[in-house]
Image (tube, rainbow, N blue to C red):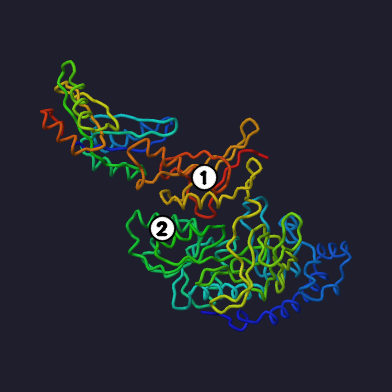
Amino acid sequence: MLSQLSVFIENKKGNLVRVTQILKENDVDIRAIAVFDTPEFGILRLIVIDPQKGKEVLNEKGYSVRLGEVIGIELTDELGSLNTVLELLSDNDITINYIYSFVLRKEGLPVMVMNVNDMRSAKETLEKNGISLYK
Amino acid sequence: MIWNEHIECMDREQIEKLQSQRLCEMVERVYYNVPFYRKKMQVLGLEIGDIKGIEDLHKLPFTTKDDLRENYPFGMFAVPMSQVVRVHASSGTTGLPTVVGYTRNDLSNWSEIVARALYGAGVSKEDRIQNSYGYGLFTGGLGLHGGAEKVGATILPLSGGNTRKQIQSLVDFEPTAISCTPSYLLYLAETLKEEELLDKIKLRVAILGAEPWTENMRKEIEKQLNIKAIDIYGLSEIMGPGVSFECINQCGSHIAEDHFIPEIIDPKTLKPLPRGSEGELVFTTITKEALPLFRYRTKDLSSLIYETCECGRTSVRMTKITGRTDDMLIIRGVNVFPSQIESALLEIGETQPHYMIYVDRVNNLDTLEVWVEVDEKFFSDEIKQLEALTRKITKQIVNIIGISVKVKLVEPKTILRSEGKAKRVVDRRHI
């Protein structure tokens, strides 16, 4: 499984850049970033190279941070590949809490990041069906 | 432990006799020495002989903070300045500071009542007490100091602020007791926790006052620090800390009745209320030499308990202050106390008691916003859970105060921490 940092931020000017600045200053490399927001606050979700260190440096600056697990799926670049994955999950009664994607720089392939209600069974289902997971 | 058993356990008849005698002497002293009161008595057609005992107390005029301000700074002193050995002033949270003075006897009486408070909290010469009340014009620091010296405790006179030093002293000097404001102690507890120093301290008891606090806040402090949190009450106009204090049974604060006569009045009609009713607390000082006051309106809401306490003290107890008539917010016609919002937050238990209340008026309608810091231990990765938390807090507050409120979650440590009296309300209405 993939480790993900979730950071509570207020929906205010400059709040996002403060987080990325702290990570940059501490050499924590960001792979992917997604913000899920409401009118007043947001949850910033990050895939970074060293999540433990990322949490520590953000905690030091007073941020509430959660280190959690998500599933990363390497998609092949062909029609319907995302649909296949989603159907598999749906057929096995797994519901998705949220989903976002990023692209691997070297390979140029898309990676889907998702959080589901039952992480273990999702992982097993996907692996059993030959879907390669990104670690 | 009882410091002065003779006085603190005196039977009602005897204490009232003592109060009556002291009141009569005081009225005479005040009449001849304080022009402000002489004039007031003359206007009321009141003569010295009309006050024969405490049953006549209600005939005397009230005194307010405004009276003290109008006679700023020393106009209400009853002795020449040559007999005044110290001056203090109120923190001035609500305007011009009010200035108070003490003779040598006043200071000695003050130490006496603080000594009673410390014994009540179980603090004796065997203890080390970190005094984190501000030393200076504010009565907290020097007031506690005098009493601690009297019982012979080892005083660590840290004064207020400088959290770094406070923490160092707690760890290195190992005090068994601390005195400060409850909000500041919570802040110290938070810092100790962050730095993983909670198991390095030897605190057993905290003597807390100078701002209203709730039972829930007490529970939070006792839980976080594993200590007993004891209330001490006082106000500079009457003396300073020690006017009343809780014993370890924590069931109301014992009033030093040999020095102050309490009354509970209806703040609107100004009529004394029957025993046990809640209303505004009023004090008459009967031994004070430098600044004797008739029926001083504290603006604090409380009620009086006359039954003998389990600890054996017979002195009347006042219940925990439920609010001040002057920090009461009137929002859309409804009385709201910041302490109610605090207790709602603490009941939810998921939030740190770090909050700020914003009151505003938009299109002639009062709005109430409560900002609450999101602590990591309940921060969820999911928006819907944070929204559920917001709804839960909102519902809880609405249940308690009865009017709608907008709750806003904010990042940790973004609400200003206070090193003295906590500022909880920003009222932008300018009414």
- Is residue B202 among what the camera can see? yes
In the picture, measured across the screen, residue A114 lies left or right of residue B219, that is left
**Residue B337: % across, % down:** 59, 50
- Choose the circle earlier in sequence order: 1 or 2: 2
In this view, A127 is above or below B371 = above
Quarter of the image where one finds residue B304: bottom right
Q: Residue at x 45, y 67 (%)?
A: B228
- Name the amino acid, label 2: Ala
In the rendered structure, are the residues bearing label 1 and label 2 in contact, judged by CB atoms less than 8 Å apart?
no
Q: Quadrant of the C terminus of chain B?
A: top right
Quarter of the figure with residue A36: top left
Give whichever of A77, B46 is nearer the camera. Answer: A77
Q: Which residue is mark 2?
A: B189
B212 with respect to A42 (left or right)? right
Residue type at mark 1?
A: Met
Residue at which label 1 appears: B356
Q: Which secondary structure lies at badge 1?
A: strand
